[in-house]
Structures are given as C-alpha cells and as structure tokens.
Image (cartoon, helix red, strand yellow):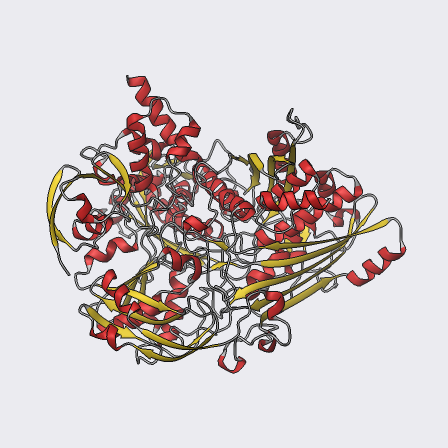
Amino acid sequence: MSRTEDGDEETTPDGASQTDAPPVEFEEGPDNRRGPDELTAVSSREEKADARKIVTGEAKYTADYAREFPDLAAAKVLRSTVANGVVTAIDTSAAEEMDGVYAVVTPDSPEVPNDPYTSAGQSYPEPSPYDLRVLRKRVRYVGDPIAAVAAEDVATASAAVQAIDVTYDERDAVFDAETAIEPDAPRIHDPERVENHQPGADYERNIEAHAEGEIGDVDGAFEAAADRSDLTVVETEWATPHQSHCVGEPHTTIARRDQDDRYHFITSTQVPYHARRQLARLFDVPIRDIRVTKPRIGGGFGGKQSIVLEPIALALTMATDRPVKLEATRKEEFHAMRVRRPASITVRSVVTDEGDLEAIDMSVLTNSGAYGSHGLTASGAIGKKQLALYTHTPNIRLEMTAAHTNLPVAGAMRGYGAPQGHFALEGHMDAVARELGMDPLEFRSRNVIGEGDLDVASSILKEGDGEIKGGARRVRSCGLPECIERGKAAIGWGDVEQPDAPHLHRGIGAALTIQSSGVPNDELGAAHIKMNEDGSFILQTGAVDIGTGADTAMAQIAAEILGARPEDILVQPSDTDVSPFDYGAYASSTTYVTGTAVKKAAQDAREQLFDFAARMLGEPRDTLTARDGAVYAERSGESVSLEAIGYESIYGDEERAQVMGEASHSTPESPPPFGAQFADVTVDERTGEFEVHDLVYAIDCGTVINPDLAEGQVTGAMHMSYELAVGSGFSFDDDGQPEVVGFGDYGIPKADTQPPLTPIFVETHEPSGPFGAKAVAEIPTNGVPPALSNAIRDAVGVRIDDLPITAEKIRAALDAE
Amino acid sequence: MSRHDISLTVNGTEHELTVEPRTLLVDALREDLGYTGANVGCDTGRCGACTVRVDGDAIKSCTTFAVQTDGASVETVEGLADDGDLDSLQAQFQENHGLQCGYCTPGMLMTADTFLQDAEDPSRDEIREAIEGNLCRCTGYHNIVDAIEDTAGLAGQSQ
C-alpha cells in the first residue's frame, strides 16, 4: 500500500520532492536468485563449524590463552566507591610493597594516557564524545576506574587493590535523566575537558547529545485535531530500565608486547579494527604497531562493542613489560562495563475515525550514565527505527535527548534503542486501536509500511555527521502481512479460551517489529578466499563471530558459489594482521554486508577456477557451472573436480596461478527485516501474577542462510526481550551504590522460568542481500515488552507502561481502576 | 601463605599439586592442570559455567576450594568423550544445536549428564528444573532441553 500507487508524491523528510529516491527495482547481482531446489549450501542446516570443539570443551576463549604466556601477570582494577567526586589522594605504597605485585598504575603514571577517548567501538569519526580517561581522579559513578594492579596471580592483585588508600572529595550526584537536565542539577562534565562534542551537546545541562526532525507539520495536525470531531488525539508515556547484556564470558583481555615490539591483544571484542584504531590514537602508537586477535567469544550482544579493559591492560603491560590478563568480574559486568540505556518516551498521535494515522509526535529522553557512549546514535534509534513502520503518516516529529547522570555507562546493546522504542510505539498503537474500537492488528495493517514503499521516517533525524545519516530507504522485500497472519494462527488470535476460574483472565497481545541490516553508508566488509590444492578453501574475513555462528554462515555463502561443501571452506577468525578489514559485529551487519563481500570474493575465485576448468575440459567457460565439488560443462556433461583444479592450478604443466578471490562490500542499502511478536498470557486479577503461555515470533529476514543458526538468533533474542519485559532493571541506593551486583539480584530468565519460544520464518527474497538474505540478529529483541504489555491489557484491562512488568504493578493498576 | 599438597583424579588421571588454601577448584583445574573446559562466568556459583563433577555430584567449581577436594575424583567436560567419540549427550547438543557461543556448554553438559544418571524418562519440566542453575544467554534454552530430552529418550530405547 504505497502512497505512490495512490498518486501521492513521495517526499523526503524535509518536504522536498524525492526525485532521487532509491528505485523500486534493484539491479541484482549475478547468481543471487536461486530457487530452493537449486540451493545446496545456503539454507541447509549446516552444523555450526565449532560445535564439536564446544561440546568437548576444547573451544578456546581469551582466558584460555593465558597458559601460553608463562610470565603473564593478572590484573585487577580499583574502582570508585563514590558516585560523584574528585580523588584528592591515592596512596599505593602498601600495595606496591606486597609480595608478588609487579606494578600499580594510577592516573599519574607515565604509561597511562591523559587524553580523553571514547569507549564506544564505532567507525571513524566516532559519533561519541571523547570524555573518558583510562584512569581518572575525577570520578563520576560508582565503578569508575582509579588505579590498577598487575601481580603474579588474581588473588594477589585483588589484595593489592584493596590495600590502595583513596581519599575523595565527594560531590552531589544526580541519578535520573529528568533531574539531570534541570538548570540547577550537579554538573557532571566540564565541556572544556571533552573533545569531539556531539550534536546538541549542552554540558551546562548534562546533555550529551540532542537531535530532532520533522516530516510535514505536526503542530498543524494537532491544531486541526482540536477543532475536528472525526480526529482523535491519543497520548501515552513509557519508561524502560537498565538492562545488562549478561554475556556468558565476562570481558577479558590479554595485552602483550610481541617479539617485534608491537602490542598484541587477544581480546573479547566485537570490533577488532575499531579497537586497533582507537587504542592507537589513545596511546599515540602507529596503527601498524597494534594487532588485535579475536579468539572465540562467549557472547557479545553489543557489550563488547566497547573498548573498556584493553587500555588498562596495555598500560599495565607497558609498566611491567609482561603479558597482562584482565578479566571483569560479574559485578563489574553489571556496573563497570556497559548497559542498555533507560529511556522515558512520550508518544502523541492524531488518528481519523477510520483508523488512519495523521500525525505521530515522539519525544525521547535517555539516561546515558556517566560517559558518552553511543548516546547520539542509540538514543536516536529510539524512535526513528520504529517510526519506519508508520512512515506513511504524513506528519511525524521525533525529538531525542541523551542526558548524563552519575550511574553506569550506557552503550550498545542488541536492538540498539529499538527495544525501548518498540515498547513505546507498539504499546501506543495498541492504545490507539482500542480507543477507536478497532482490532489492533487491523489498525496497524491500515497504516504499516509495505513492499515497494519508501521509508522516509528512519532518516528523520538530520542532526550531526555521525551514524545518524542516510536518506530515504526503499523497501524491496516485506513479509510482514504473512508474519501477521501466521503469527495470529499460531497464537490463536481472536480465539482465546478463558480459564474457568473467574479470577483468571487470558489475553493475547501483538507488536510489529522492524530493524535494519547494517548501518547504511557506514559499513565495510571485505573477504579473501584462496584455494588449496585439495579443493578446499581458506576464507578470511574480518567478520567477527562472537558466538553467533557467523563463520559457518560465511562458509555456506562461499560454498554455494564455489560448488564446494561448507566444511571444505575453512574460515579463519578475525585478526587485524591478516584478516581483510571489517567494521565489526554490530548493527546486524555481518550476514548482509560481510556476507555479500564473501559472495563476491567467491565469485572472483570461481572465475579463476573456471579458467583452469575450461582448459582442462576443453569447453567454453561460459557453459561451466560449479556444483557438488566439481565444475561441470553444460554441453558435454563432463566434469572436473575441485581437487583436480586445485592441483592443476598449482602444479599443472601450463601457466600456474593460485586461485585467490577477493572483494569488498559497502552499500547505501540497509533493508529492514520485519517481524510480528505475539504473547499469550493469563493474569490472576487478585494478585496481579501472570503466566506467559507462549511467545510467538514470525520473522521475515529474507532468505534464511542457516535455519538452525537463525532460529538460535530468534529464540535467544526473544529470551533477552522477555527479560527486558519482566526481569530487567537495576536498583541503586540514595548514594548511587548499585544493589544489583550479581546474577542472584537480577531477573535473567532461567531454564525453568523462560516461557516457551516459538519462532516462525516467513521467507522473502531481498534483492540487495546475499542470496536474498536480510539481518536476523537484533530484530527479535524488540517485541516482547509491547506484546506482553498489550496482552495484559487484553486480559485485565490495565496497561503497564513502565518496565519491568511485575505482579505488583498489575495489582496496583487494577486497584487504581 | 601456607601451601597444601593435594591429589586429584581428573577424568581418570591422577594429579599431585600444591595449592594455597584460597585456591579455587576451577583455578586449580584451569591454571594448574590445563583443564580449560570449565569456564568462569561469575564468582558466586550462580551461572553454572564452571560446573564439574566431584565424586559423582555436579558442583560449582568457582565456589569450591581445591583443598576441599583433596583425594577426590573429578570429572570435567574433557572427560565426556571416549577417545574422540562423543558421548550421547554431547552428540545430542551438537545435533539439536543446543549451543551457540558455547561458554555455558561445558557446565550445562556436566549438570545434565549428572541429572541423567538418575533420571528415567524425565519430563521437560523436570529437565528445566534440573538445569535452572546453569544460565545460557544465547539460546533461550529450548534446544538445550531438546538435547537432554533426546539423550534420555535414546538411553531409554537402549535399555
């Protein structure tokens, strides 16, 4: 239901005619559209390449490399015990005198840089302020690192940290974003001490970044609504809390000086190349003198898109001339690494009696915590990512502010603002539908974006030069209508059987979801593939498999082109010394961006092996196809195996050449995956207690490269989304001391508290993606909070608008009725 | 600091080692003996990544001192496979894609393997209860429960 089909002119967010809008037709690359019967490696349930090593315990994570360095030192960090203040004295003498202590570093140590940096592992130039110092005397939250120790073992390092005596000059602190931006709130940053200020920054009001944008005339739409009885105004307010990534493997890094006096990190990172560049700048070392090796990673979810431990470990390596291992404790994971930012969101809309959206006005305030890390871009994504669903609305306004407080530092987390925004917008849409007396899904279907449409809403924010950029986006694949229908059928939409007990009420809720496939105009993936004489291939990409199975998916894409088996494609883990460049594992980019680079590199290699095959078969090369481990001549039916080609290329009598393919991929495209989330709940009206019977998520991620891996992404993300709905949130005492310091205090769903998860795949073909694929990693993180809140509204008539949803809140809302 | 000589039998191999009273079993296994399969995800026994079996019981090795296990028989994930042949539970985790990043997997396997030694034809709810002390952040648990259920089913068939 594109407006253009109705004859309306497409417009850009600033109202100008969209003459340069991306066309509906996309010039698809060769070999991209293969029928289900033609695909062999792609779409197969190829076993995760490292599954065997995982179940035998042989898979090696960063900490497992410690044994390779006999002179390794263990490190610990001394962290601030006050939420806001200045360290006036640090006495390290007792720590330094302890047996087994190799070095103690403080902000005054020569090895510790004093220049500010950002811990956000983003592309250059980073859209985050440089407001962070490796170790600091001006501390801004409980957990700020002040000093660090390297010692012969962890116990000694811990004891030494405890022996350091710190004197603070404590200052008034501020913990909530609403108070922080008031004129008389305590000031957290001195703007003179911050570099790389972000758009809208106003440190006099603790504002890290601010951006806004408008399509049409929102005020005009609300003024019209005030005068007209056929227009309804609905206003809702929403709040979301902190969420921890709860990575299985805590952040861990080993820093060392190698035999060539270069600095080598083995580190649990999602962004090896950004880490290399940012560490080089921070320590004033040439980029070439730093190497970042990514071993196996025990989960990232955005938490490891930050450079938090590496600088401290490097300073200790410089101070001791030893390899240094620094591992975060779980308490540090909760408070001193990074978290999902809390948000307060207001949504207002104007809607006609028929159910057509006339205006949406969305206002977002986020709590960035003490330092700027993804504040502009992740806060901006609250709103713009979801508004794309309702881009047909003629009048849309979005305004966002990211505010500093004296709480833990927010960063990137799976969904990147979209989970907060979906809770608000999809809860709001449910409220609007109920106000109109319409079926919530019929109401959405009237207004939602569809195939062929131009998405102008996701580029509504025009501020800044950072990741908030890009123009209107054309939707060339959209399985949302089928996602809705299949999800409805699976959950039993409109067909709920109420429990016999009069105090129990069952309800169903839904939410639509959308995300992107990489950052448009701001990604680069590259791949190199070379053939061995036995017909196998070595594939190198900078793609960062953080546990997802990306390496396996990359092998499948290459195998599909080369006619090889996926297990004949050996994928090397990313290492900045040898892997081609990659922006890293974030923004759901790996399959879409790096996967396309891999496909192109494999095509390049296939052209070369066709040269040999044509010669060996005596057939024209344009009649050749690669499949089943061989190259076939269409005309004769003759074939030559990849192994034979491998030997011929290297040891043959005629001109020899190593078959080596290479390619890069960057793109202005970022096609949205879509999905529909459903929740089925029974609520006890006496207590507010609720039981979730099923969470159904129907997803359109284009072609599914590997069904098992994709399903794992969906169920894992739904688990995380369910946690945001019912288990998230940190509490702090009046002084900003964290009260959630371990898994025992935090509501992570366990095996016996996780409700059933039902993924449904609706396959479409995205012409700009490898074999039609779009992103899958983040979008399923978005839907459970609104779907569950809407289901509870359906069951008992009250709407919970601040997360987490608890029995107490439901009971209180019922009492207030 | 005082040091103690202890002996541990790990996956059938006897080891003599010297530890401090504060040395945790997980550190003795990982750092002193090189059994790096058990992982450390927290230090409070809450996540289960460090689960190993001591004298037949699945325990959290991050909250157990090595000296407490002097003379004990310890089984780790490295001991499940028999000369390269995966045992049934490992094979089912692989088959059912009951894993993702893999960090929780060794502990999950040891808890499930211990549970299955006594459980006959367990229900899915019983399986979920049995592994509630092992956190997984990647999978949503569903395939892990499938893998354990299938292993139990295969064991039932072969009896």
Residue A204 appears at what percent x and percent y? 60, 78
Q: Nearer the viewer, residue A138 or A27?
A: A138
Q: Quadrant of the C terminus of chain B?
A: top left
**Residue most extreme to the bottom:** A192
Task: Give the total of numbered labels.
Answer: 0
Observer able to see residue A475 = yes
Q: Is residue A217 above or below residue B100?
A: below
Q: Quadrant of the N terminus of chain B?
A: bottom left
Q: Is residue B51 left or right of residue A704?
A: left
Observer able to see residue A467 = no
Q: Residue at x 66, y 38 (%)?
A: A481
Residue A317 appears at what percent x and percent y? 26, 70
Residue A380 appears in which quarter of the rendering? bottom right
Q: Is residue A454 left or right of residue A536?
A: right
Q: Nearer the viewer, residue A303 or A470?
A: A303
Q: Residue at x 57, y 76 (%)?
A: A203
Residue A433 appears in which quarter of the rendering? top right
Q: Nearer the viewer, residue A760 or A239?
A: A239
Residue A483 appears in which quarter of the rendering? top right
Residue A485 appears at what percent x and percent y? 65, 33
Q: Residue at x 29, y 52 (%)?
A: A658
Residue A572 appears at what percent x and percent y? 32, 51
Q: Nearer the viewer, residue A788 or A673?
A: A788
